[in-house]
Amino acid sequence: MSTELEELADIQVERARLDAREATLMLRFQDRRRREADRHADPRVRDLEVSFAADEIGVVTHQPPRTVQVRLAEARRVRAKLPQTWAAHVGGRIDGLRVHVIASATAKLTTTENLIHLDAIIGDYAATHTTAQLKAKLSRFIARWETTDAAVKEERSKRSVWVNHQDDGM
């Protein structure tokens, strides 16, 4: 491999490590805000204070609070439910986009066994394949291993039909 390609590969690894470091710091900040909010007796005040964490992170990262909330939820899900995959992210083998795709698929899984099985295979796959290939692999995994109707119902919920009556019987 040429030196330029090696340097590009090194930059990609470093970028993925920075994605993971950013996600880790965001989670740590949110956790600290949760601990601070726990001192309030009123649960509404606690929830409000915790929700401000996304606003504060958004100001620093120049991202909308909703985007920050989604990133926090996805990072927390992957870190908690897919430890091998999270380790691959921290190690720079999987970037933030792939973590997002994996986290979205993880939300469709209903059993711990499926999460463990996915964690065992998806880190290495995500590190060596394109995002489109990863999405296809995750779709196949869900279709094959998720035996409940939850995934089917979710896919059906995305479908819809509209009838729009126009002038002249159109």
Image (spheres, grey):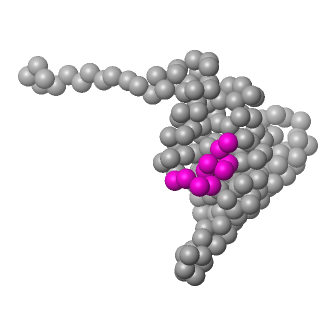
Quadrant location of the C terminus? top left
Q: Quadrant of residue 115?
A: top right
Q: Is 84 on the left or on the right of 4, as rendered?
A: right
Q: Is 138 on the left or on the right of 81, as rendered?
A: left
Tell me residue 127's x, y (percent). 62, 55
Residue at the (46%, 22%) spot, across then down:
156
Q: Is 128 one of the magenta-colored residues?
A: yes
Asked if residue 27 is positioned above or below residue 137 in the image, the reply reads below
Q: Quadrant of residue 20?
A: bottom right
Asked if residue 90 is positioned above or below residue 141 in the image, the reply reads below
Q: Is 78 one of the magenta-colored residues?
A: no
Q: Which residues are magenta?
A: 121-130
Outermost residue toward the bottom in this view: 3
Q: Report if residue 110 is visible in the image.
A: yes
Type of secondary structure dominating the magenta stretch: helix
Q: Report if residue 71 is visible in the image.
A: no
Asked if residue 168 is positioned above or below residue 72 in the image, the reply reads above
- Camera-side residue: 34 or 98? 98
Outermost residue toward the front in this view: 1
Residue at the (20%, 22%) spot, across then down:
165
Tell me residue 97's x, y (percent). 58, 53
Tell me residue 22's x, y (percent). 71, 61
- Camera-side residue: 82 or 141? 141
Quadrant location of the N terminus? bottom right
Q: Is 19 on the left or on the right of 29, as rendered?
A: left
- Camera-side residue: 137 or 153? 137
Residue at the (88%, 46%) spot, across then down:
35
- Camera-side residue: 106 or 36? 106
Residue at the (64%, 34%) spot, across then down:
107
Outermost residue toward the right in this view: 39
